[in-house]
Image (cartoon, coloured by chain):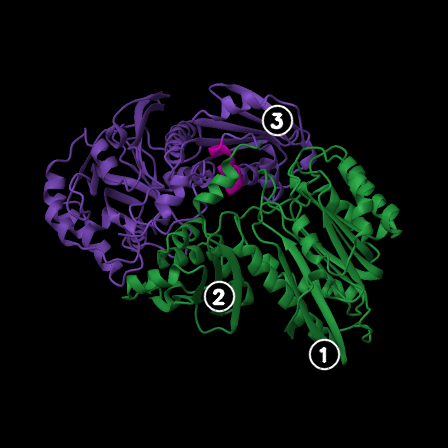
Chain colours: A green, B purple
Amino acid sequence: MKQISGGVCAAKGFRANGIHCGIRHNRTKRDLALIVSDVPAAAAAVYTTNLVKGAPLTVTKKHLANGVAQAVICNSGNANTCNANGLEIAEAMSALVEQATGICADNVVVASTGVIGQPLNLEPIAAGVGALAASLSDQGSGVAAEAIMTTDTRMKEVAVEFTVGGKLCHMGGIAKGSGMIHPNMATMLVFITTDAAISSEMLQKALSGDIASTFNMLSIDGDTSTNDMVTVLANGLAENAPITSEGADFTAFMEALNTVNVTLCRMIAGDGEGATKLLECKVSGAGTEEAAKKSAKSVICSSLLKAAMFGADANWGRVLCAIGYSGADVDVNKIDVSFRSAKGEIQVCKDGAGVAFSEELAKQILLENEIEILVCVGDGPYSACAWGCDLTYDYVKINGDYRT
Amino acid sequence: MKQISGGVCAAKGFRANGIHCGIRHNRTKRDLALIVSDVPAAAAAVYTTNLVKGAPLTVTKKHLANGVAQAVICNSGNANTCNANGLEIAEAMSALVEQATGICADNVVVASTGVIGQPLNLEPIAAGVGALAASLSDQGSGVAAEAIMTTDTRMKEVAVEFTVGGKLCHMGGIAKGSGMIHPNMATMLVFITTDAAISSEMLQKALSGDIASTFNMLSIDGDTSTNDMVTVLANGLAENAPITSEGADFTAFMEALNTVNVTLCRMIAGDGEGATKLLECKVSGAGTEEAAKKSAKSVICSSLLKAAMFGADANWGRVLCAIGYSGADVDVNKIDVSFRSAKGEIQVCKDGAGVAFSEELAKQILLENEIEILVCVGDGPYSACAWGCDLTYDYVKINGDYRT
């Protein structure tokens, strides 16, 4: 599998665009994105488990009930959540896409990210959607990725090429995550496109299966947002024999999807609010997959461990503590812990107790901006990886400031 | 019920003391506490659920197996956890108490709080325990409370008097919580004494029942420590007819215990690491007790809400978001939210959507240092309260600094 450029436009038949339409006051920040496929595509999605759900998710779920979609519209600056007219506005956004592109409103994925509980003004979207559609381009992934950012500091896109049944396929994605302009948001949105031919059932199976070990293993601050959503559109223009069951083709597709998702996970974690470091916790030797996942995620979610990583402090006791309360079925007397980065690797705990180590080397390793926390919990066959970031003054600043 | 002075020495027949013995380098900080009862007392305890448990907890659990205790020894500065010789050291601490006081080592509660994973040196304890025991006093609660502090900024003690079967009884407690000298600790310890006569079975029932709505509803940073413990010693010197079953006497005892525990919970939350505010989330109108508790605790644990409270920002969307992912069975379209403090009360959300409110008044209310977050989730009969604190720069500073 090869990483390529092009993001959501890397796959055949997809075009995108992103503009400033005026939802945000800052004219230099794009706030409306559109992605379209030349032909209707099989579609799948996963949504936040928060009972408080953004209105766009409800509308998208309805539109994807038949497994088909052809466009994605997404605004930033306002989450269109906890508003009395939220569903109406989300449907109106779909209708505007139909007017501007001819794509049936029922085939539109709608997403919004931004402040909760403030009515979303449709006017700037209505005024801008014509220009947005008119300049759709196969070079448009980057501006679309920019338009969905909130306080993300970096645009997030990825694309790969892979082979299914001898046919060259492409898959790409854009994401926003863990940024806030105002508090109340914390939303993660991921839009993936591919030209591989796959049934919507198998597409959903691939997505649901993969997120269990990718986006569901990602945490910035432990707060599950109201607007999280990951969607995949597969338009079949690669002309492979459609994937309708498990087998080699499905496996190839899953590998591509996993590469795209892991790459986006790492990008989101590394750009978490206020983050100075990407943290990857790799747990091995677990007796069950559940124990491996619970352990890895608990470490990544620990405020104490996150603050220690900010301080480049090799506080392995916090790793053990987090595994101890994770609910994972592990023997705490068999846990080994090491820290690794570009500067090297150092073991700090063996069989649940400290080992002598060079604090100086540990500090060197932990001052890097990508840190692996390597945990072996026994001699079982299961492993898991979770992604997160450090807890910093800037996280408090970003989320403690008054809304303005 | 009347609040009185005296802390753990308010009840008849209890004496306490706290000294600097040398576990800590700072000679001005007391680091060893002792509490004794003149006679053997019924005893009960609850312990951390963390699989990684401090050695003192294992020893205490063994000593309390027969429901009897007569002394508590506790050091700060070192948690005696994740050490190869931890059990041996904890037993040795009990033996030292026996040597110094004549109280059987098997009747000693042992506790330690401080750094994890560094061997605890018994020498300063052995050298100091004689002086510690020699100056036990019924005025000693305050110095004992000081001796168990880590980075707590305030000493925590409380006492009440109450009546059981016509006899005047007393109950008091000291606590430490949410402080760290070095990272890796986050331990909460509570020692309660009473002169009420109660069987150890009913004492355990009272304690286990009460902590479900007190200490288990408290969160500073979501990290369950390895050394948390709450113990109660009831020596019977009030000469009430012993409480051996449910009824009016048990109810009176439970009320006293709840008052002591709620007071200590509020003290611990308000002195959370880096905290500038005590947060109390009061949820009413829930259909089940579980829904009320899950909702309240989820709000108190939300990093986003905690950071908003630090910024005195009336971000009610974060309250809804936290309830939405709490797992509580509630109708999110029926949630009302208000904020209240000494400066007044303001409603910010009704039926799951925002209402117009004065941002100026909201800010005035939230700038106070004790904030109530009032949530009504419907018209059910259940309510719950949870305690926490804001997330501040100082939390990151305290926990991000290098160990020294």
Disc 3/disc 1 C-alpha distance (Å) = 55 Å
Q: Label 3 belongs to which residue? A: B348
Of pointers 1 and 2, the one earlier in the residue sequence = 1
Specify the principal SS of the magenta part: helix
Query: At 38% from the left edge and 42% from the top edge, which residue is drawn?
Result: B201
A143 lies left or right of A321? right
A316 lies left or right of A77? left
The N terminus of chain A appears in which quarter of the rendering? bottom right
The C terminus of chain A appears in which quarter of the rendering? top right
Give neighbour class at mark 3: few <14, some 14-19, many 20+ (Cα, 10 Å). Answer: many
Query: At 63% from the left edge and 63% from the top edge, which residue is drawn?
Result: A261
Disc 1/disc 2 C-alpha distance (Å) = 28 Å
Give neighbour class at mark 2: few <14, some 14-19, many 20+ (Cα, 10 Å). Answer: many
Pointer 1 and pointer 2 on the same chain: yes
Q: Chain of mark 1?
A: A
Instruction: Give amino acid for label 2.
Output: Lys
Q: Label 2 belongs to which residue? A: A282
Q: Secondary structure at mark 1?
A: helix
**Residue range (magenta):** B301-311
Query: Looking at the picture, does residue B294 appear above or below residue A363?
Result: above
Disc 2/disc 3 C-alpha distance (Å) = 43 Å
User: Residue A248 got which mark?
Assistant: 1
Q: Quadrant of residue A249?
A: bottom right
Pointer 2 and pointer 3 on the same chain: no
Note whether residue B115 is visible: yes
